[in-house]
Image (cartoon, rainbow, N blue to C red):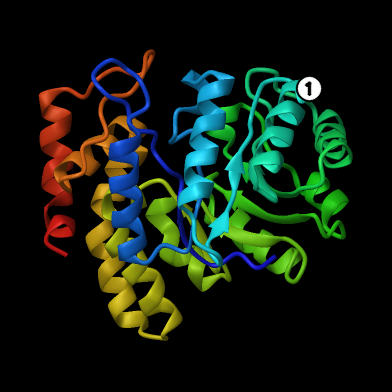
Amino acid sequence: MKLSGVMPALVTPFDKEGKIDFKAFEKLLVHLREAGVSGWVPNGSTGEYFSQSTEERREVLQFVTDFAKPGEILIAGTNAPATREVIEQTAMAKEIGYDTVLLAPPFYTRPTQEELIKHYETVLAAVDVNIVLYSYPAKDGSDISFELMDHFADNPRVIGIKESSGVLQRAIDIASRYEGKIQLVSGSDDIALDFMFWGAESWICGPSNCMAKACCDLDRNYKAGDLGKAREMMKTLYRAMNILESGKFVQKIKYGCELQGLPVGECRAPLGPLTDDEKAEFRAAMEPILNW
């Protein structure tokens, strides 16, 4: 399975009562499709899956797959702290129509690499899906080592790794070491152009919820060979991307959607609202993107 283009790590809209707002969700997805995204990644950390019940996760997965058109990539986030629950979530996604899942190390538990290898092997044995590994040690407290990637490099069902460590040298090492085996997927948004240069043909991108056209234009111009224009675009995107990485990531993305005329509600607790100063800083950085 070839991964390509900009795939939004989708936010989950909530209404004033805190319930999933599917009307706002549809409006957002229509906007993203018009901007040129290549697929959909629901129920990741940007989608606040950690705050959802199993039934809500099912509803989100079903809604997105019902909206998707043939040829659009579908990747379900099925993370959980225990292997048993990951298998349950993955089986549910498979039943709904997802053949690929995005899996970080189980959060909170901090497994050893040997335990993590066993975890992924168990999921693969239990459910017939492809896996995109997800490396985000700052959030998960556990890394995906080269030992683990070596172990799965020849497994055709481990198709890629979303690399969100923010360490470009590691991305370069992955790209060169696993070329033709494990696809490098951009997950460090403020250095996305660098990832493209080193072979990442796809970008699972939380910020694309609120800056989809800019992200897709960057991807298109790079692939068209216009490196100068792509570099200028990355300069324009960089400040907003960098502010997102500084904290309150999901809250800022949801506020960015509001600035785009696509309100998606507040985040669920424990994620709290932005301060006026945080809104002003991000709004200023978004100004050239809103006028893209």
Instruction: Indicate left or right for 159 with 258 as reference.
Output: right
Split into 4 quadrants, where in the image is the C terminus?
bottom left
Q: In this figure, what is the number of numbered marks?
A: 1
Instruction: Indicate left or right for 110 with 243 as reference.
Output: right
> Looking at the image, is 53 positioned above or below residue 152?
above
Residue at image coords 58%, 50%: 163
| Element at label 1 | helix
Residue at image coords 46%, 45%: 9
Split into 4 quadrants, where in the image is the N terminus?
bottom right
> Looking at the image, is 217 positioned above or below residue 40?
below
Q: Would you identify the image quadrant in which residue 248 lies?
A: top left
Residue at image coords 37%, 26%: 20
Please state the horizontal and vertical placement of residue 235, each as a whole percent of the image. 26, 64
Answer yes or no: is residue 37 visible. yes
Answer yes or no: is residue 166 visible. no
Residue at the extreme front: 66
Amino acid beneath label 1: Arg
Please state the horizontal and vertical placement of residue 107, each as a whole percent of the image. 63, 23
283 and 85: which one is in front? 85
**Dot 1 corresponds to which residue?**
84
> Looking at the image, is 50 positioned above or below residue 178?
above
